[in-house]
Image: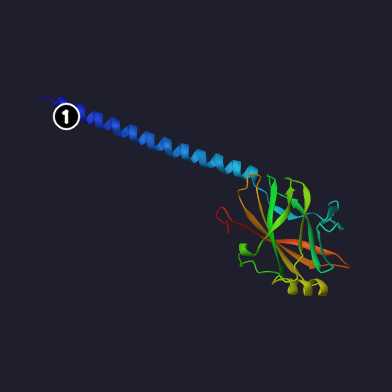
Amino acid sequence: MADWATISSLATAGGTTVLAVATFVSVRSANRSARIAERAVQIGLRPVLMPSHLQAPPEKLRWLEGRWTTVRGGRASVEEEDGVIFLAMSLRNAGAGIAVLQSWDAKPGVTTLQEFPNLDRFRRQQRDLYVAPGDTSFWQGAIRDPNEASYPDLHQLVTARQPMTIDLLYSDGEGGQRTVSRFALDPGPETDWIASVVRHFNLDRADPR
């Protein structure tokens, strides 16, 4: 005679196991879908800064001292006047989200790709600068204190027209996805300086390299 109590218990256990497996698979699928959706949102907000094209329209900008500078497409401006080093660069945003410039660092020579940016050296932007997705704009920064440790080297660099490195720290419109884009500035013909991007460093997510 069949032991119906045992059969019933086994059937219940089997049903519970099937339900548990189905729930686990459903939760994994939901988590995967949530991660994909979150990544899609991040990509939609992510900026990527590059030098503007050479044919891009010039950018005209004003300094606190009241002086004006015009930066042509794909180029930078490196000038010194009355002991102040004025730096500017024409930019374009190749990403899908607005770029909010946060801070910057300038160094003589072209920094190696492997050297990670030292964020303690960065200077905070004195004004809000934005680059809209698919559009061009500019970056500007100035070194006004001759007593800064980096001033003598940069002063000599500007005078001799030697290459330099600019690291720009920026975020998306929500303040996330912080990125440092490293630019090389090389002296061109006459007073021109040619800007080129060297590498992008991701601060808030894994580096794809």
- Badge 1, how many Cα within 10 Å: few under 14, some, many 20+? few
Expressed as whole percent of the image width and height from the top left, the position of residue 13 reads 25, 32
Whether residue 117 can be seen here: no
Which of the image's four quarters has the N terminus?
top left
Q: Which residue is drawn at 59% across and 41% down?
A: 40
Residue 28 quadrant: top left
Tell me where residue 203 sits by quadrant: bottom right
In the depicted structure, whether residue 66 falls above or below residue 39: below
Q: Residue 39 location in percent, x, y?
A: 57, 44
Q: Is 7 situated above or below 65?
A: above
For image coordinates 84% across by 68% down, the residue present is 82
Q: What residue type is labelled 1?
A: Thr
Which residue in the structure is indicated by mark 1? 6
Helix, strand or loop under label 1: helix
On the rendered structure, is 9 left or right of 98? Answer: left
- Return the residue found at the far right: 190
Q: Quarter of the image holding residue 165? A: bottom right
Question: Quarter holding the C terminus?
Answer: bottom right
Give percent across and percent down for residue 154.
Answer: 75, 71
Would you place residue 195 above or below residue 24 in this image? Answer: below
Q: Where is residue 15 in the image (x, y as percent from the top left)?
A: 29, 30
